[in-house]
Amino acid sequence: MLVTTLILGLVLGGTYALLALGLTLQYGISRIMNLAYGEFTLVSAFALVALFKGAGVPPLLAIVLIAPLGYAVGWILYAVMMRPLVARAGDAGRLDVASILATFGLMFLIQGGLLVTFGADFTSITYLDQGVNVLGVPVALNRLIAFAICVVAGGGLVLALGRTRWGLALRAVAQTPGSAPLVGIDVNRVARQGFALGTALAAIAGASIAMHQTFSATDGVVFTMKALVIVIMGGVGNVAGTLIAGLALGLVETFVATAIDPGLTLAATFAIFLVVLLWRPQGLFGRR
Amino acid sequence: MLEVTDLRITYGKHVALDGASISVGAGEMVAILGANGAGKSSLLGAVGGRVRPASGQVTYKGRDLLRLPQHALVEEGIALVPEGRGIFPGLSVAENLDLGARPRRAKARAGAIREQVFTLFPKLAERRAQIAGTMSGGEQQMVAIGRALMSAPDLLLLDEPSLGLAPIVVQEVFAALARIRASGLTIMIVEQNARATLALADRAYLIEAGRITGSGPADTLRTDPAVVRAFLGGAAVAES
């Protein structure tokens, strides 16, 4: 019983962690609080379903196609929509207000587009859903694959940020943007890359969710909220903290669902959120 | 090498610099001396790309610097150590230095320059894994200067490198500046500590209320009665 909860919780948490990574990058590096984040995961989820059902593209191949598309969309969106906000805002507080309002509008725009294109019905695909035995617990193969994608993408990101020159520049901008031009870093360019990378991660998360979960065109806000809860729990801009908080949320939700009632998972999520906000607003692993 | 012509800098209605012209030749160390708020940091900030002047010209090796964004100046060979140091406090000493070596001009020589920086500031070699923000003010200044040197600059801009440091640490910083200067690097420095700066510089400009009010070789200025009164404190100089 406990082992089952642990394994299913970790598998769910892996998806959550991946979901939250993109949001934390977008806010940490680009300083854009993207309330339309969940809509980007949804667009990607629908794209995967359409590619699979319409063109017979295998989901794993579809993810490889969708991820760079996500990067491109994020890149263009930052250049066209976010950059003017950043240029005008001047300080972080005003940018927060501007980006929240702007992406709140964008959320409805994308949601409307999805409703018109795909309708309001729930969608899902059947793909690799046979059970696999993990330490005596049967887990659907598609969920394990989604977890593996999280480990690869999340681990790759942690390594890239921590070990490469490119990652060092990203961290420098995330921590002290005012000093970055002194070492020749073009902050605007790095912010655009961070936003694009975040969108690519949203796309990967959305595609891996579509492999094993039923979803509809109005689910974006739930994805955004869960990602936001994890980001704040992990400490904004803290990649390792986000990974841990994502796994923790998956464990808590699975535990609540099995031990108490499946209907309470969302309530549990927001109860944790409230406690973190009251007790450690800088996040469980945040400094300051 | 550097020509600043009729530079005017305003912040809203406040005029920080009202038509300043200076020049810095290759291999020279030029000091800008003046009281708080005289406009010397604004002048340096304009050369370093941090401050956008209202009018005037800044040319460096014949290139118009005002057309370039701040981040492009490092590649031109200009490194700024701003007031408040501008380091990355959340990153380690080694990471700060690595970031300094980002420009293409420095990449190939990064290893050799790093050794020079470590020779200049042995403390940085000992503390390379330490998070820069946890160091003392003087050590952070060493990180800032070391990081600037990592970019293999031709022109080093220093804004108040001794500000807020204990006297013994100030000595240490100026000793390091003397060695940097001896290596032949062109330096433009803004300082409150006029005595130590004039002892090191070739020439100096005096700046008051946004205008250049005097200039000359450092040796001459050190004994100029007006300079002594305004910047050096008369009695103290009589002793030296």
Image (cartoon, grey):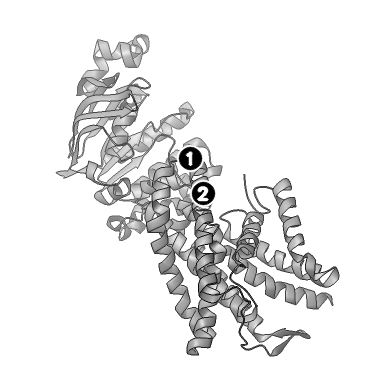
Is residue A63 rendered to the left or right of residue A226? Answer: left
Q: Which mark is residue B221?
A: none
B211 up-or-down from A270: above or below: above
Q: Which structural element holds mark 1?
A: helix
Tag 2 and tag 1 share a subunit = yes
- Residue located 32% across and 13% down the image: B230
In the rendered structure, the residue with mark 1 lies on which chain?
Answer: B
Tell me whether circle 2 and circle 1 mark residues in contact (CB < 8 Å): yes
Which residue is drawn at the image coordinates 41% and 58% (left, top)? A78
Q: Quadrant of residue A227?
A: bottom right
Judge whether residue A174 can be spotted in this image: yes
Q: Quadrant of residue B52?
A: top left
Image quarter of the N terminus of chain A: bottom right
Does B13 sit above or below residue A146?
above
The amino acid type found where label 1 is placed reads: Glu
Quadrant in the rendering for residue B163: top left
| Residue B127: mark in rendering | 2
Q: Does residue A253 lie above or below A171 as drawn?
A: below
- Along the viewing direction, whichever of B143 and B48 lies nearer the viewer: B48
Amino acid bearing label 2: Arg
Q: Position of residue A113 (x, y in %)?
A: 50, 68
Determine which residue is flagged by label 1.
Answer: B139
Position of A173 with respect to B220 (left or right) is right
Total labels: the figure holds 2
In the picture, measured across the screen, residue A33 lies left or right of residue B11, that is right
First in sequence, mark 2 or 1: give its number: 2
